[in-house]
Image: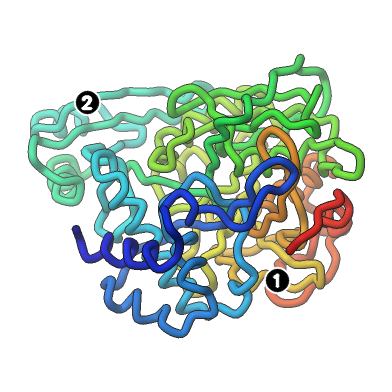
Amino acid sequence: MSKHLLVIALLLCAAAPSVATAQLLGGPVGGATQPVAGAIGQIGNTVDQTASRMTDSPLSRRDQARMVAPSLDRVTTPLAITQTTADQLAALRLMRLQALIDANRATLERDTDGQPVRRGELIAVNPEPDALAAAVKAGFHIIADEQTGELGVRIVTFTPPKGMNVRAAMKMLRKAAPTLEADYNHIYEPAGGALLPAASAALAAAAPIRPGTRIAMIDGGVASHPSLAGTAIEQRGFAGDPQPTGHGTAVGSLLLGDDGPFRGAARGAQLFVGDVYGGNPAAGSAASIVRALAWAASKRPTVINVSLIGPDNRALSRTVAALRARGITVVAAVGNDGPAAPPQFPASYPGVIAVTGVDAADQALREAGRATHLDFAAPGADLVAALPGKGYTPVRGTSFAAPFVAARLAATGSLAQLAAEAMPGKGKVGRGIVCRTCRITPKMVGLKLK
């Protein structure tokens, strides 16, 4: 067992009788379990340094284990996160990232910055024929060559020479074909929560797409739920068939939900869901996200919500720029790894609307991450969202603030109007708080918290 995995195992042993139960917080809520949050970041320290930062953490060992263990079942965080230091948030990020890689060694490895990437894959954007020929001559094999339709972004996927890891392969590829715009096939994760493969819930049923406001989201799949009954949703999978998830369901419900006191911010809109996970936390690659964005663009949405975070990637950057050139705005969450985390993407790309979260007191979330720019804030705590199948759960994180901004941008039609309705807040909230009255509290849906 590696030292990294040993740290995770020790946390888990100290936390709960089994890994499965360690991934859940609390008991049944509205007929389902109440999950816990997480996000992904960058490895830059040793495990010893990382673990030492957590010795005086306000988070219990049990909560640390829940936030670090690779899981598809998290949509909220323990309140002790509000007393966690930036350094401790950074430590949790590193531990979580390493745990994800260790749990998926067959499909993941790391780049030179420690970010998780698809094992044995490199990608190139809009390659010239001479550069492709040079790569093949150097021993690289082309396994996919995809054109993203009207966006005009071509992605070629290579496998390196046999026995070579992606870090050595990238160095070799850049030497063999220096003009090739090459990158790793990075993995992206939810920016406040993770993906619950909802075995007990079906995928939200498709309904006829009508004329009207169109919004797309790149996430996990959206599950069936009373608040989404009869809504116009179309879903497509880009890592296998689409699968219902807790994270995707929560985000989708905050957009379209309509069930008594629970009301989403874009009720009546048409929603197009690009599932880039297929229920697998080790999916969500840059190439899958690019394909999903291209499909979403073909649906002519006003805005695309991306409540995911990860590193800068050339293919993703090119695709976001192509969307912007076609008048489609991307709204993205800044993540929840705290101010010590590196800027996250796609929120940090030019033209993307970067969103943070605030609590019921209009205070910016302590754990909110950062981007190279910050545009708006929206409710990201002290609110509920739908659980797969039925019921509601408290959610916390910038993932759940982003859909409010996306909804209001689709409704107002311009950034100027969005800025005009933004309200002041406390802390770093960009141009202000959007959709402040959109928060549905636990009390409003009859949810009693312990």
Q: Which mark is residue 142?
A: 2
Q: Position of residue 420 (x, y in %)?
A: 87, 59
Q: Residues within 10 Å of mark 2 (few under 14, many from 20)?
A: some
User: Which residue is more in the foreground, 266 or 259?
Assistant: 259
Dot 2: element? strand
Q: In the displayed image of the protein, which residue is found farthest to the right?
A: 260
Q: Name the kind of residue labelled 2 in the image.
A: Ile
In the rendered image, the residue lying farthest to the bottom is 56
Identified by mark 1, the residue type is: Ala
Q: How is the image coloured?
A: rainbow
* Rendering quarter of residue 82: bottom right
Q: Which residue is drawn at the image coordinates 33% and 67% (left, top)? A: 10
Percent position of residue 143, x then y: 25, 24
Locate residue 241, reporting x and y percent.
49, 22
Mark 1, residue position: 364
Residue in view at x 82 percent, y 42 percent? 264
Is residue 20 among the parts visible in the rendering?
Answer: yes
Locate residue 115 relative to residue 22 in the image: left or right.
left
